[in-house]
Image (cartoon, helix red, strand yellow):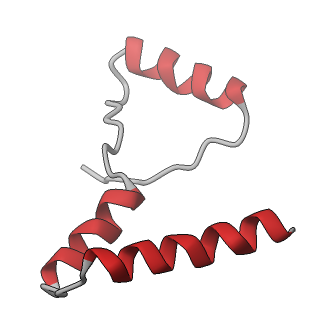
Amino acid sequence: MATFSIEILNPKAKKLLQDLAELRLISIKEDKKNPFLDVVERIRSKKANITLEEITKEVEIVRAKRYAE
């Protein structure tokens, strides 16, 4: 059995894949990975000792950049 990761660009392709799954020719398993949670996990694994003041300062910098645009 071969396993592939497919990025669907057109909704028609998704329908075709669902039809193949209904015919029991393929099996579809959606990837439950969340990129945001991957970043959170990576940060937590570093065991960074970030203070609330440092977080607040960083948030304020990002907000200032966002609203300046």
Q: Residue at coordinates 19% horizontally, 87% vertically from top-left?
A: 48
Q: Position of residue 61 (x, y in %)?
A: 60, 78
Q: Nearer the viewer, residue 64 or 47?
A: 64
Q: Nearer the viewer, residue 32 or 15?
A: 32
Q: Nearer the viewer, residue 66 or 28?
A: 66
In the picture shown, does residue 42 fall above or below 18?
below
Drawn side of residue 50 relative to residue 3, left or right? left
Drawn side of residue 8 relative to residue 9, left or right? left
Q: Position of residue 16 (x, y in %)?
A: 60, 23
Drawn side of residue 40 relative to residue 46, left or right? right
Q: Residue at coordinates 51% horizontally, 15% vertically from top-left?
A: 19
Instruction: In the displayed orientation, state which residue is furthest to the right.
Output: 69
In the picture shown, does residue 41 fall above or below 36?
below
Please state the total of marks drawn on the protein image: 0
Q: Position of residue 14 (x, y in %)?
A: 59, 27
Quadrant including the C terminus: bottom right
In the picture shown, does residue 24 fall above or below 17?
above
In the picture shown, does residue 45 fall above or below 36?
below
Q: Nearer the viewer, residue 61 or 33?
A: 61
Q: Residue at coordinates 31% horizontally, 53% vertically from top-left?
A: 2
Q: Position of residue 35 (x, y in %)?
A: 40, 60
Q: Residue at coordinates 31% horizontally, 35% vertically from top-left?
A: 29
